[in-house]
Image (spheres, coloured by chain):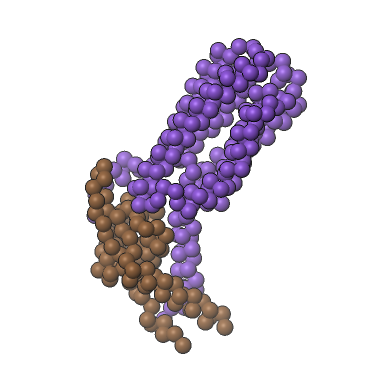
Chain colours: A purple, B brown
Amino acid sequence: MIDRSEAEEHLRIIRSLMEKATIYRTISAEAALVAGSLSVVTASVGASIAPPSWDLAVELVEFATPWVLVLLTASAANFFLLSRDAQRRGEAFISQRMRLAIRGMLPALLAGAVCVLVPTAGGWAGTASLWVLFYGISLLAASHFAPKSICWLGRAFFAAGVALLLAGSFVFDWWLHTNQLRTAHLIMGATFGLFHLVYAACAWPRGAKAEATSPQP
Amino acid sequence: MFDFEKIDKTIHEKGRLGIMTLLATRPSWAFQDLKAELKMSDGNLVTHLRTLHDAGHVAVTKEMLDRPQTSYSLTVKGRQAFQEYLGVLEQIVKAAQR
């Protein structure tokens, strides 16, 4: 005879495992490594060659173009790695969990994209800060079914975005008198570069080597 | 009145219950993914999977991707047994609340 507490305990096990199985990692560790490395390199090169220009049209090409290329490359790598994982698990690439994640993330990502078209009062440094903030919001929007590492990444971007915008407001004059292009590149490198590298190190699948060598049944 | 003794003892064991639950969430699971999710040893997992396979609850697929991979999925009988098992647990909880 099974008593109530045993039945409840088994229902708890079922619920907890089902919740774990619906967790969706929107950014693979390998893709974060690609994104982080590309961002650090792009920021370093961009900041070192940035001319002290105030011509917005020139700056749009010099600032936005390399970062859009980084975004496209990192996104392509992420989609490739997610599709490989989905194939390994025998799931459709565009699963219900992926649809939910995209639906949650899309509004904030679109808001970030619009910032490229509308110059902010803080110049490109302000735009970079907004990108950091909106990216953080987009990750947090998918946090209900994301692993803890993604939630922490979202919190880090959100906090950095808020801090950068506050700092930009308080030292606005200072920002306007610095090399906008260089500051913007450095903001991107410090956040999209370093944060993704830290995330990749934390989320890197441990025991991958052991899995590859352990016997199959 | 439901006869609680009719509960499926094959599924009721905690290790096998975990396997059945995970298999109910996706079309199929690779052995290594099940092992990682349930934190079981190879031997333990193989034994439980064999028991479930012998009971007709689990189907096994072996394929060659970049390396040999064994995947497991619920059979129609297994999915039905799992749903019935859930129903029994719910009835037990409800009965105790009355």
| Front-lying residue, B21 or B62 | B62
| Front-lying residue, A79 or B11 | A79
The answer to whether residue B15 shows anywhere in this view is no
Tell me: residue A164, above or below residue B16: above
Q: Is residue A198 left or right of residue A131?
A: left
Point 47% across, 68% down: residue: A11
Q: Is residue B89 left or right of residue A122?
A: left
Point 49% across, 58% down: residue: A19
Q: Is residue A53 left or right of residue A88?
A: right
Which quarter of the figure has residue A139? top right
Tell me: residue B74, above or below residue A195: below
Residue A15 horizontal/vertical position (percent)? 48, 63
The answer to whether residue A74 shows anywhere in this view is yes
Residue A12 horizontal/vertical position (percent)? 49, 65
Residue A189 horizontal/vertical position (percent)? 55, 25
Tell me: residue B15, above or below residue A63: below
| Front-lying residue, B98 or B67 | B67
Residue A44 horizontal/vertical position (percent)? 53, 19
Point 36% across, 51% down: residue: A89
Tell me: residue B66, above or below residue A128: below
Quadrant where the C terminus of chain B sits is bottom right
Point 38% across, 52% down: residue: A91
